Image (cartoon, grey):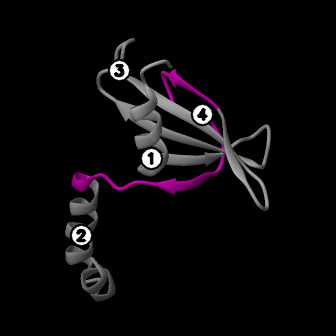
Amino acid sequence: MVGQEPKIGETMAAPDVVIDSRHDPSVRLYHRLYEQTPVTRKYVLVAVKVLDDDAFVVTAFFTDRQKQGSILLLRMLPTRLLMLRYESILRGDEKMLREG
């Protein structure tokens, strides 16, 4: 991952999804999809160990797909957010319209 430090930082700052590790409940798996990497279209995965008074990166690597586990955060892409707003208009969901 030499030279990929900006992608690691972007992945931690604005992940597409954050997943609880199935193997270690104190590890969070940050994923972000990049269309271009040194090895084609891949996710950058950054594994972060979260302790009571500290957190640190365990590892970072490219992967073809997101790892399995409980989803903690899912970033809404603009097209999906627009679709949710459109669906709320069709349903007449006033609360969604005010918050959106």
Q: Amino acid at mark 3?
A: Arg
Whether residue 21 sits left or right of residue 86 in the image: it is right
Range of the magenta residues?
A: 59-79
Q: Which mark is residue 85?
A: 2
Residue 85 drawn above or below residue 95 = above
Residue at the (50%, 22%) spot, across then down: 62
Q: Position of residue 74 (x, y in %)?
A: 46, 54
Instruction: Name the residue: 27% across, 61% down.
Output: 81
Mark 1 → mark 3, Cα distance in angstroms = 16 Å
Q: Are marks 1 and 4 in contact (CB under 8 Å)?
A: no
Q: How far, Cα to Cα, is label 2 from label 3? A: 30 Å
The mark closer to the camera, 2 or 3, is 3
**Residue 49 percent location from the top left of the image:** 72, 45
Label of residue 1 in the image: none
| Three-letter amino acid code of the residue under disc 1 | Pro
> Which comes sooner in the sequence, label 1 or label 4?
1
Residue 99 drawn at (x, y percent)? 31, 82
The count of marks equals 4
Q: Determine which residue is flagged by label 1.
A: 15
* Labels 1 and 2: the sequence-earlier one: 1
Check disc 4 and give the amino acid type: Lys
First in sequence, mark 4 or 3: give its number: 3
Q: Quadrant of the C terminus?
A: bottom left
Question: Is residue 35 positioned above or below 16 on the image?
Answer: above
Disc 3 target residue: 41
- The residues bearing labels 4 and 3 have C-alpha atoms spaced at a distance of 16 Å
Q: Is residue 97 above or below residue 14?
A: below
User: Is 44 in front, or is 59?
Assistant: 59
